[in-house]
Structures are given as C-alpha cells and as structure tokens.
Image (cartoon, rainbow, N blue to C red):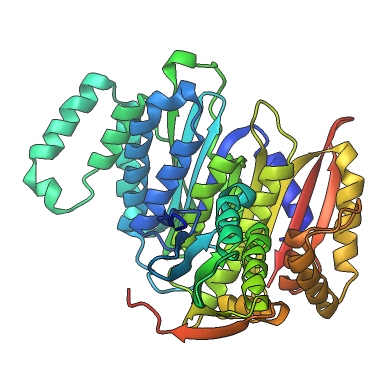
C-alpha cells in the first residue's frame, strides 16, 4: 500500500457515498459491526432502507460462510470478500467466495431461474421450496436467493472466476434501490466489484472504508476494527488501534468539509510482514504548506529526538509556533517503522487530496 | 468537604472517581475523546481545589488501557497538579496499572513516570480471561 494506492482507490470509489470492504475471517462480529457502520452512515432519505439492508447483508454473509471452508488458512487472493457500497440511490452488497467447480452448474441454474421469475412466480417457488423436504435436506435450496430477489425487486448479477481445476471464485451482487428517490442511473456492473476485489487481494488490504469521517462516524469505525482484532496479540492490536485513533481523529479535525461531512478513506493492509495503515482525505489548499512543514519536521528527527520533544510537550504543551507539530503527529512519527509517507494531489483551486501511510 | 466526582466509563471516556471522603482517586478505562479539554476541565478544577487541603496521603490509581495523544496532555496536567501536593510536604503515590502483555500501556506509563516528579509505581495485573 502506498500513498498512490490510496488516491487510486479514492478515484475508483469516487461516486461512492459509503463504501466498505472486508477480506478474511467472517464472524458474526464483523457482520454486526458492518451493519452498524452502514446504519451510522445512512443519509436520512435512505434511513427507511435500514432494515432491508441489514437483512440483505445477513443473507449475503451467510451465503459466504456457507461455502467458506478454509477456516484457519492464511489470507490469499481467494479469501472471502465482502463489500457494501452506496452510489447514487442504490446500495450494493457484494460477496465473493470460493466454490467447488462441480457445484457451479447447480448454483448457476438456481440464480438464472430466480433472475427470470416475476413476483408471483417467486412467491410460488418460495412456498414450493419451503414445503419440499427433499430439497431442504440437501441444504442451500436457494431460499436465500429467492428472498434476496423478493426483497430487492431486482436481479442478482453473478459471475464465476476460475482459480484452478477444482475451484472458482463466486461473485454475487445484491442491489437495493431507494424507489422513492430513484435517480434512474444504470446499475454498476459486477465487473466493477471484481476489479475492486482483485486490487484489494493483490495489495492484501484487509479492510477499507470510505465515507464520512466526522466525529460521530469515526467511533463505530474504530470499534469495528477493534472487534476484528480479537484474534491477534494484544501488542499488535494496541498498535493498530493507536494509529487508527490518531489518524482518524486527525482527519475528523482537519479534513476539508462539504455539507458538514468530512469525507475520507482508510485502509488496513498487511504486506512484507508489516501492517500498513493508510488514510486519504480532502484538504484545503491553503493548509497544505503548514501540514507539510509539520510532517517534514517530525520525519527529519530521530526516534530519540521525537521522544524528547514529546516529553517536553507533555509538560509544557505544544509550541505555538506555526509549522510546529503537535503531540499527535510526533506520536505517529515515533511509532511508525519507516517515516510517515504522504502525498498531496491537487483536485482544484480550492482543495487537494492528502494521503498518508504508516507501517509497523 | 469537597463534593466527589464519580463518572462511569463510556466507549470513549474513562471511569473517574475523585472522592476525598473515602480516599479514592482513580482513572480507569480508555480516553479517546476528541475534545479532552472539555472532559478533563472539571477534573482539573476539582484537583486544584483538592491540592489546597489534601489528605495526609493520596493514592492515585491510573488504569488506562488506552489514551489518545490529545488526552495525554490532560493526564499530565493531573500529574502536575498532584506534584503540588508533594511540594507542600504531604504524601502522593501514583499507581499506574496495565494488563499483562500490554506493552504499549506499560511504555506510556514509563514515559509519564520519566517526566513526572512523583512517587510513581508501574504495576502489571494478569490478563483477563475471555
């Protein structure tokens, strides 16, 4: 993950009002938190979709965990993937998981069938499947698929990407439109989701979130990451938590805001035996110089010098000189293994995109 | 008698007990409030009053699993207020507690101990069973 990657993702998800992706182990905790995060981020006009969205996320999640059988394996490009995004007036829930090639024809048949049926036919099929013991005992009779189509009143785009002779990745997309405010825009093709999955897998990004980074929204984000860190050592857990709090709070304080929202993106990745945390947000052009001076100043200091400065400010408070870094930046600089990496990409006369990464 | 301050911990702010009558002084939990000045100013005010007529011995317990950098200054402010008691000849002891394996909390304690002038003890307690 580099500062460039963060900007590329920002461009890729430019139209997303909310976007969240996760790879790895799927526990109920992840599900609860992902649902919470989405709820916290919902606009008022989309609030009434809340329950439907939670329901669909649960269905989609269970769909992943039904097929997932690589429980203790390491993360790789075939790890389960889950993504929610809100573009315009449509919500997308995307899942990807491994499937045995010999199961593909059955799944394909079920999906093609539900995708062609109208409302009446779906209800009939639902009752038929529900009462047919024989089908039920085989498990995964497609009730989930029927429910998804009934709830969304749309189609379920899907695709299979062959991994080897035995397995493929199974992509499925649920789309929920807010009928009241329908913008009439065409749906995002499932190839978009495949593209995102491909990059997060290649970069080994575990979690990514784009949305509002104002104070209220940062809380649930921090708690979600924390919930997902239960299986790693307390030492690492604390460090990730520390970086996140400092970086996210920094964004919520300084990001350029439009309509009271402070839009930003954050990613956590693991590469070359190091955790990488990256964030990106818009910043007013007239603040760049000061921020750059501050980061350059902490980057030019040794760890010892940073410690000394931190301790001095602890007692005396931050220096009021312009361009002098506060405790937060000093702390980031002394905890990150390499320097703080950053980049400013000008968007227009008013603001630029500021991306930053730290690692350990 | 100074009215005690007792605050329950929240997702973002620590539990606070400042109770002169029962000789209990404690901060526990996490402090990641974005505007720590607002949260800590009543605490600082209370301590400013307390240091004017402290108990003969003040045992102050700090058991913070996590605090953000903007809270760090506020916590240091508490320590510096306690230093005033020591200057006046009375006894102050700070116990900094951390969970076994939590190196970061230990390091943060070591650091504050280094810049403080107080009798400052850093103690580990066993990890909670989940």
Quadrant housing residue B78 = bottom right
Closest to the observer, A25 or A257: A257
**Front-most of residues A145 and B32:** B32
Residue at 35% in and 35% down: A112
Q: Residue at point 56% right, 37% down?
A: A18
Q: Is residue B24 left or right of residue A240?
A: left
Where is residue A328 drawn, in percent x and y?
Answer: 73, 60
- Answer whether residue A154 is visible to the viewer in this image: no
- Where residue B17 sits, quadrant-wise, is bottom left
Whether residue A71 is situated above or below residue A20 in the rendered picture: below
**Does A52 sit left or right of A242 as displayed?**
left
| Vertical arrangement, residue A130 with respect to residue B59, above or below | above
**Frontmost residue, B19 versus A334:** B19
Which residue is pictured at 62% across the width and 61% down the height? B68
Residue A255 in view, yes or no: yes
User: The N terminus of chain B lies in which quarter of the figure?
Assistant: bottom left
User: Looking at the picture, how far across and down is residue A307, in whole percent?
Assistant: 78, 75
Judge from the rendering whether residue A75 lies leftward or rightward of residue A337; answer left or right. Answer: left
* Quarter containing the C terminus of chain B: bottom left
x, y (%) of residue A181? 49, 15
Rendering quarter of residue A12: top right
* Residue A128 place in picture, x, y as percent: 12, 34
Relative vertical location of residue A194 with respect to residue A45 in this rendering, above or below: below
Q: Decide which of B6, B128 is in the foreground and name it.
A: B6
């Amino acid at each position: 993950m580099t500062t460039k990657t963060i900007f590329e993702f920002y461009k890729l998800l430019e139209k997303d009002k909310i976007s969240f992706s996760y790879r790895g182990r799927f526990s109920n905790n992840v599900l609860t938190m992902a649902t919470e995060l989405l709820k916290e981020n919902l606009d008022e006009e989309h609030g009434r979709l809340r329950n439907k969205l939670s329901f669909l996320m649960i269905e989609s999640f269970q769909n992943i965990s039904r097929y997932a059988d690589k429980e203790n394996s390491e993360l790789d490009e075939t790890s389960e993937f889950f993504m929610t995004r809100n573009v315009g007036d449509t919500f997308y829930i995307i899942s990807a998981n491994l499937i045995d090639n010999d199961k593909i024809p059955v799944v394909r048949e079920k999906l093609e069938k539900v995708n062609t049926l109208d409302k009446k036919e779906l209800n009939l099929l639902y009752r038929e499947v529900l009462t047919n013991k024989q089908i039920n005992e085989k498990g995964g009779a497609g009730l989930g698929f029927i429910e998804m189509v009934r709830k969304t009143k749309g189609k379920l785009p899907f695709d299979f990407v062959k991994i080897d002779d035995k397995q493929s990745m199974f992509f499925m997309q649920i789309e929920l439109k807010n009928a009241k405010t329908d913008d009439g825009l065409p749906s995002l093709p499932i190839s978009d989701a495949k593209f995102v999955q491909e990059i997060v897998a290649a970069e080994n990004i575990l979690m990514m979130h784009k949305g509002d980074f104002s104070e209220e929204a940062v809380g649930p984000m921090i708690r979600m990451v924390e919930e997902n860190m239960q299986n790693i050592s307390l030492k690492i857990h604390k460090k990730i938590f520390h970086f996140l709090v400092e970086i996210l709070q920094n964004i919520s304080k300084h990001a350029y805001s439009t309509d009271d929202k402070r839009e930003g993106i954050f990613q956590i990745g693991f590469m070359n035996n190091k955790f990488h945390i990256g964030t990106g947000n818009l910043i007013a052009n007239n603040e760049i110089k000061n921020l750059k001076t501050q980061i350059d100043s902490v980057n030019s200091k040794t760890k010892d010098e940073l410690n000394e400065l931190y301790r001095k400010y602890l007692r005396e408070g931050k220096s009021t000189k312009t361009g002098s870094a506060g405790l937060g930046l000093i702390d980031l600089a002394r905890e990150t293994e390499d320097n703080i990496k950053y980049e400013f990409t000008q968007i227009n006369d008013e603001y630029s995109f500021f991306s930053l990464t730290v690692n350990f | 008698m100074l009215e005690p301050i007792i605050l329950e911990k929240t997702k973002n702010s620590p539990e606070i007990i400042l109770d002169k009558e029962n000789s209990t002084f404690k901060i526990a939990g996490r402090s990641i409030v974005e505007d720590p000045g607002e949260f800590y100013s009543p605490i600082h005010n209370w301590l400013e009053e307390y240091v004017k007529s402290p108990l003969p011995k003040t045992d102050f317990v700090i058991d913070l699993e996590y605090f953000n950098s903007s809270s760090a200054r506020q916590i240091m402010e508490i320590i510096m207020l306690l230093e005033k008691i020591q200057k006046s000849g009375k006894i102050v002891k700070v116990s900094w507690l951390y969970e076994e394996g939590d190196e970061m909390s230990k390091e943060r304690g070591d650091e504050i101990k280094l810049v403080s002038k107080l009798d400052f003890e850093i103690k580990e307690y066993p990890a909670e069973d989940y």
